[in-house]
Amino acid sequence: MLKLHNLLTIILGGLFISCDNNNDPITISVTPPETYSFERGDQTTVSYGGQSSRLEMAGELSVWLNTPIKNKEELNNMFNNGTGFGNPGLAMSDKKLGNKTASSSQASSTVKPQFDAMIDDVTSNVFPNVANDASDGTPGTYTDPDGGRTVIINGKGHEINQLFTKGLMGALVCDQIIWGYLTAGKLDAGTNKADNDAGTVVEGKNYTQMEHYWDEGFGYLYGLDTDISNSSIEGQDVLVSKYLKKVDGSSLPGIAQELYDAFKHGRAAIVAGAYDVRDEQAEIVKTKLSHIIGRKAADYLRSGAAKINDGKWADAHHALSEGWGFILSLQFTKNPTSGAPYYSNSEVNDMLTQIDNFWTVTPANLESMAAGIESKFGF
């Protein structure tokens, strides 16, 4: 008979637990399902309706920020009060964008006012002057002489809806996922871990609080996806999901599958009570999301430089406006080595100051800034 050396190995389904004199830590191996599908009692436990509502709000608000019809009060109500949208169900959802913007970040006291200031700028300076021919210091409308793109911009050449929407990539999506829902502090708050271990669900719901928090993080990326059975983004792509599609097919191939797999694996780990695996997968999600932001920040700076060199100023204003928003978003990324954002709030604001006037910024400076971002991210 073989001597067991006091080692007892129990294999139960997909869980592998090993104990040595009851002192070894429990190790749970998790095999994720093929799709992001989780049930309890034959009923789904996945729910992220609030995130879907906010993504829909962001998509519509982006349109109105570039359409000189709404006034400041109307746009402010959409952003901060969650009212005035074409879909009346959004107001009934009691969800808002403003109260979630930069709400998980230490930089919230400075970032949220930047978004409110954009609403003031577009309604006070841009919309009343769309009949003007825009130029340095003069807000209005600019069309490239060859009949190309037309933009409505402020006196610095900023296309406000692009600054705003790309800024929400970080201040809303990354803030909520990276620094909010997928943190151990959020997932394990209060009795969440004990409740999850016991299978204790939220009153009136079919999910534990920990399961729901993870799903809410998932919802900020996939909330408008019409088919979450695979990694592709189907239907309306808003905020980061739109750029996930872009980089997956070009500069960061395979990232869509990596993100989907990490979300799926982490959720399966929660079901299994394997919190070390959960946290490992959360870090993958955070790193990959950060790479999308860093990649596009550099890309749009380079695009802006190229358009200036080509004399296509409307295209340059558009690209640099997108780049401005992605730079703002850099402070909501996370460097897996340091555990801090790739760029601090002060570093981001310094970069934004350097490119503040799109009419006077030089292609060389834009290229240099893009190269710095690429170097920091290791691209």
Image: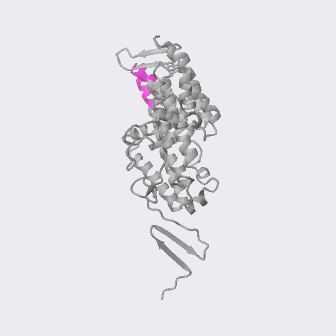
The answer to whether 49 appears left or right of 116 in the picture is: left
> Is residue 188 shown in magenta?
no
Residue at the left extreme, as displayed: 146
**Residue occupying image coordinates x 48% and y 35%:** 89
The picture places residue 159, in percent across and down from the top left corner, at: 48, 23
Residue 303 falls in image quadrant: top left
Which residue is at the far top? Answer: 132
Compared to 75, does 373 lie above or below?
Answer: below
**34 relative position to 181: left or right:** left
Q: Height in image: 284 above or below 372?
A: below
- 111 to the left or right of 321: right
Q: Which residues are magenta?
A: 300-317
Relative height, residue 332 to residue 349 (above, below)? below
Residue 295 image offset from top left, x and y in percent: 46, 38
The residue under the point 63% across, 53% down is: 189
Q: Nearer the viewer, residue 53 or 117?
A: 53
Q: Position of residue 219 (x, y in %)?
A: 48, 44
Asked whether 197 or 358 is in front, the reply is 197
